[in-house]
Amino acid sequence: MEIDVRHLPDYLFEASWEVCNKVGGIYTVLSTRANILQKKYTDRIFFIGPDLWGEQESPWFEEDESLFAPWCDWAFLNQHLSVRIGRWKIPGKPIVFLIKFDTFFQKQNDIYAEMWMDWGVDSISAYGDYHEATMFAYATGMVIESFYRFHHLEAKNVTAHFNEWMTGAAALYIRKHVPKIATLFTTHATSIGRSIAGNNLPLYDQLEKYNGDQMARQLNMTAKHSIEKKAAHHVDCFTTVSDITAAECTQLLQRQPDIVTPNGFDKDFIPQGSDHDRTGKKAREILLDVAEKMVGHTIQPDALLIATSGRYEYKNKGIDLFIDAMNLLRKMPQLSKDVIAFIMVPGWVKGPRKELQEILQGKESASAGSPFLTHELVDPQHDMVINQIRHLGFSNSERERVKIIFVPSYLNGDDGIFNMPYYDLLIGLDMTIFPSYYEPWGYTPHESVAFSVPTITTTLAGFGVWAKKEGDKKEGISDGIEVIRRNDSNYMEAAEEIAALVHELSLKSNNQVKMLKQSAVALSDRADWAHFIHYYQEAYSKALYNSFIRLSYPYKLKE
């Protein structure tokens, strides 16, 4: 679709639970895309997120009471809408509305009844985070309407973009109450698809046999699936992030996305030149130092440092496959180099291990405690990672080439052991491995190549599918990335391939590794927002065009 300048927005609203609220990958999508959008629509793009902060302010939000103060006061006095306005502390510093939504719980049942009568949204079996997200979303719809009417934007092209099922109620509210606003809805992963995968059911081999409504009832996901499906069907433009999730949406939500909007990356904050080298050297020293203190013996200075990271989704993120691959690697008699495999996945932690902290600080201690854990878990007996490591017989002893270290803490620069942010540690790695089973896009391998770190991902990751088409042209890791085939029936084959690829890397010279890093960066250069933002421009244009048709010829559009 060619973009018509008449169908581009004058004002944009974009809502997400992860605006100024760092939870997962959607935060990265929005926060890195914001910079280029702010350049295109300076202070005419407004991000909307939940105000979850009490006495301690969000570290990503800077309040500015001078922004839209007359409207803010009017909305509070006349509509009881509590909104704080400021700047998102990211490149571009876009305007943000943070919404308090506590008062909406008082009329929760009325809101659910309204959504049922208007759209058929089934909230009867809702539980947990559904209530909180939906009250935020409903409040978001009211805030957008209030701003729109107060500032008399009726003659402007206005779009409102909603991310994930958590904001579905806002999309439906705007469609009903302010139909002139063009609406977009993006699912980054369908709630029912993620649930099918997380419940160890074969998502891909059986996809065409699944009915989304039926599976939602079976897996107790009816409310989330219902609001997601209704939002997808009643917006002017429905998008998703990869070809993989497009197929998932078509089958499970019964609407084919209008546009696939792949996730880009903003590389402005990545260290360059000598800064990159210095950061990488420091990270490598810290990673090796922690590893040596944990296992209690010297590790080869040229040891391979590899890692997996992301959310603690044991099967979906391929954490289980990563550990099994390391188990196969450690049994390879031809492996002649030490390999330190880090699992950087936040878990349920009490805090850093005190005895390990003391050793790292140079204090005398008999032992660092567990040779596998950098931080103390609340319930180690039931932790899947630790149980798999122990079941497979890892020891991290001196005679074993492969050591495996579980880092179950958020790496925000203040974890008590590494005290470096994840990105700064990432630069010190030789390779990353993300053998995902369910990964709509895959920022972790995307980040790796952007930081010059060769990576392994799978054909079940959106980024992997994109990379397979665009950059993974050679066998093995020689071009900086390898996208291995994964499906519902080749688990051990994938594990064997990962082990072989790590062994292949262990045989490469320093010059060969340097070339790998350069190849990784070259791939990432084609996957930044400068290349991908046009998909969003196309989505805005399509939403506005469809809204014009909807308003002019309502009988022509199927609901």
Image: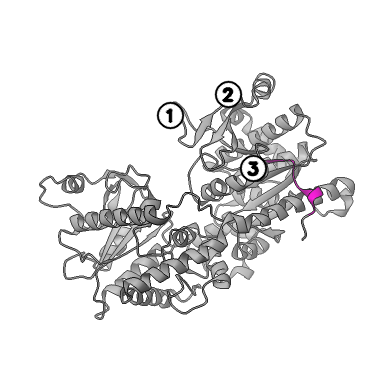
Extreme front residue here? Answer: 274
Residue 391 shown in magenta: no
Q: Secondary structure at mark 1?
A: loop
Q: CA distance from mark 1 to mark 3?
A: 25 Å
Residue 200: x %, y % from top left: 47, 64
Q: Give the mark, 3 or 2, whose residue is nearer the N terminus.
A: 3
Residue 169: x %, y % from top left: 66, 42
Disc 1 target residue: 56
The amino acid type, in three-letter code, at marker 1 is Gln
Task: For residue 461, say whether it is visible.
Answer: no
Residue 467: x %, y % from top left: 54, 68
Q: Give yes or no for contact between labels 1 and 3 (Cβ–Cβ under 8 Å).
A: no
Disc 3 target residue: 14
Of the pair 64 and 204, the residue shown nearer to us? 64
- The image shows residue 186, relative to residue 335, as above or below, that is above
Task: For residue 290, say whether it is visible.
Answer: yes
Of the pair 52 and 34, the residue shown nearer to us? 34
Q: Which of pointers 1 and 2 indicates the residue nearer the eye?
A: 2
The region drawn magenta spans 4-12
Which residue: 31% across, 54% down? Answer: 283
Query: Which of the 4 quarters of the picture holds residue 181?
Result: top right
Q: Secondary structure at mark 3?
A: strand
Disc 2 target residue: 65
In the image: residue 502, left or right of residue 207:
left
Q: Give the mark, 1 or 3, whose residue is nearer the N terminus.
A: 3
In the image: residue 366, left or right of residue 249:
left
The amino acid type, in three-letter code, at marker 3 is Glu
